[in-house]
Image: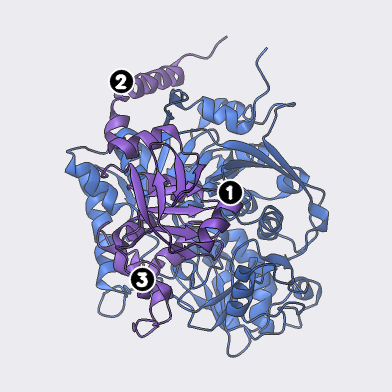
Amino acid sequence: MQQPRTLFDKVWDRHVVVPETADTPGVIYIDLHLVHEVTSPQAFTEIESRGLKTRRPDRTFATLDHSTPTLPAGLNGLKPYVTPEAEAQVHRLEANCARHGISLAGWDSDDRGVVHVMGPELGLTQPGMTVVCGDSHTATHGAFGALAFGIGTSEVAHVLATQCLIQRKSRAMRVTVDGVLSPGVSGKDVALAVIAELGFGGGTGFVIEYAGGAVRSLDMEGRMTLCNMSIEAGARAGMIAPDEKTVAWLKGRRHVPSGEAFERAAVDWLTLATDPGAVFDAELVIDGGAIRPMATWGTTPDAGSPIGSRVPEPKSDSDRKALAYMGFEAGQTTTTQAVDVVFIGSCTNGRLPDLRAAADVLRGRKVKPGVRMLVVPGSEAVRRDAEAEGLHTVFTEAGAEWRIPGCSMCIAMNGDFVLPGQLAVSTSNRNFEGRQGKGARTILASPATAAASAIAGVLTDPRVYLTEAVDA
Amino acid sequence: MPEPLKTLTSKVLVLSQANIDTDQIIPARFLTTTESRGLGAKAFYDWRYEADGSAKPEAVLNRIDPTEHRILLAGDNFGCGSSREHAPWALHDYGFRAVISTSIADIFTSNALKNGFLPVVVDQATWDDLAAHPDQPVTIDLEAQEVRRGNHGPVAFAVEPFARQCLLDGVDTLGWLQKSMPAIEAFERAAQERATAPEPA
């Protein structure tokens, strides 16, 4: 009888082209390669300098998201790129895709979106696949039971040229979040709680499988949020076993098989779950029922705690430096400092349920004067759906800006950024020094928390507004 | 193709902060480049320059001679965060050839090894010893997999054997991967056959 295997083992085993040995890593087949404008130009240059072509353009899909403006073209028809270099980078990807026969969700496409929002939406991401992208948040796709991880530009060239990567198998960790999540607690809060427990580097060298009742209870978007942030604990990939929710979410999407082929695929997907008795190299169990809405107070994603709790005493010079940068003091709460900017969007929290959660808090209320609130849908599809539901009106009537899709203020390379010294509550994934703009101070939180903080003008537990009746 | 790297002897630059992420190594706003060369000027940019572009005189990276400091001694969890290969490109172009830390992020390690930049993980005691003697030359001997400070040491370090061989010989990893093309084609044929095979009764 075969040894019990983990979800990670099963997906890995299906993709071994050449097994690893003591001296050499294995060669692993990649089913889906997602490409964006920032980490790909040098890879195309590299393979072209060798006279190579993209081997499987049919397994390669590109989008424009990082360097793109989130404001529409002006009256002159020109898009407001932050610099000529940003525009040139976008044109470079357009030209590379045209030359290599790669599908690009470009400016004229209804599919365009942040790469990790777009891939699942189109059904490109499917259970059991290997998915890579020159982007550390590729783990997002693991929510479907795919093995998905970020790669560097040299590896982007490897995949373009060979559809394979040179890899050694990572160790396996299971993070079990048991129990029932409280109302107002989202996938983002679970992610921040897990990372706080693991530590910023605690997942280094591991692929994480998220399991347990609280994880199962998340919708697919919440699961994507959780897997998305695996890299913030150092893990390259996070995965969740496919279940009936996964199957239902994928049914009918453009690149997913249909009819009988779908039924066959679904049966196969449900066999991917970790076998009983499979052994992990590390295990962590968290009580999901104890998780409260979370927010970070430091400059690493693991520096998070329930909103309203006190900032812990610094344990190192690095902790002291982080507190000095953030302007927070040990022993104090972080709920009294005026918030300058609220950002809702990104590959972490730019999907429809994220926008609904924020709108539910904001409906009939106003963003506090002096607070700038930016809402950036994760894709054109999210934008269409949100507008069909009238969510954009909820945001604009509350005083927020409603933008077109892109990474925007998460990485702050397109002209959307937080000013030096300003305090932002952001639904993105990184609170590093300067991540949202030079000198910007970032608090990471859920969409509901971000919306509540926009209303109150200080970091606020969203449950305050979810229980309070609105006098509309 | 990276130049071979066998041994490296240099003073170390100590950046003791933990969790130096790739946004610190090169801020995202410089990633609109389509080149991989010439990024040394952007290395640790926000640590080195004010908002108006003037150099911060107190910044250690503005005070050292990069040709004398080829080794970075950095705090725990170096290179965490984004997957940008621009980080090792920038460090290499600035003049660094290796980083020593108590832990180094996975993707950074993978990117660094493909660019002739050696990530070396040591235990805390070794790190403390090196940090206490920043002016004494340190030798990283990749062939022997040892770190030595003057006559002290040696301390062994681990490195993935294939990556080590690639660095020692200047192996082109894409060229190596291409040698597996027959296996890749066989894999694809088998997958195609499985997909079109009739369902078992």
Image height check: is A346 above or below B103? below
Q: Which residue bears the numbered disc 2?
A: B182
Q: Earlier in the sequence, mark 3 or mark 2?
A: 3
Q: Which residue bears the numbered disc 1?
A: B123
Mark 2, secondary structure of its residue: helix
Here the colouring is: by chain
Q: Can residue B127 be seen in this view?
A: yes
Residue B109: x and y, percent? 45, 47
Q: Give the color of chain A as drawn.
A: blue
Q: At 62% across and 36% down in the image, what residue appears?
A: A172
Left or right of residue B30, residue A364 in this image: right
- Say which mark, if any, is on residue A323: none
Residue A173: x and y, percent? 66, 40
Residue A247: x and y, percent? 61, 37
Looking at this view, is A439 or B187 the one in front? A439
In the rendered image, the quadrant that contains the N terminus of chain A is: top right
Q: Are marks 3 and 2 in contact (CB under 8 Å)?
A: no
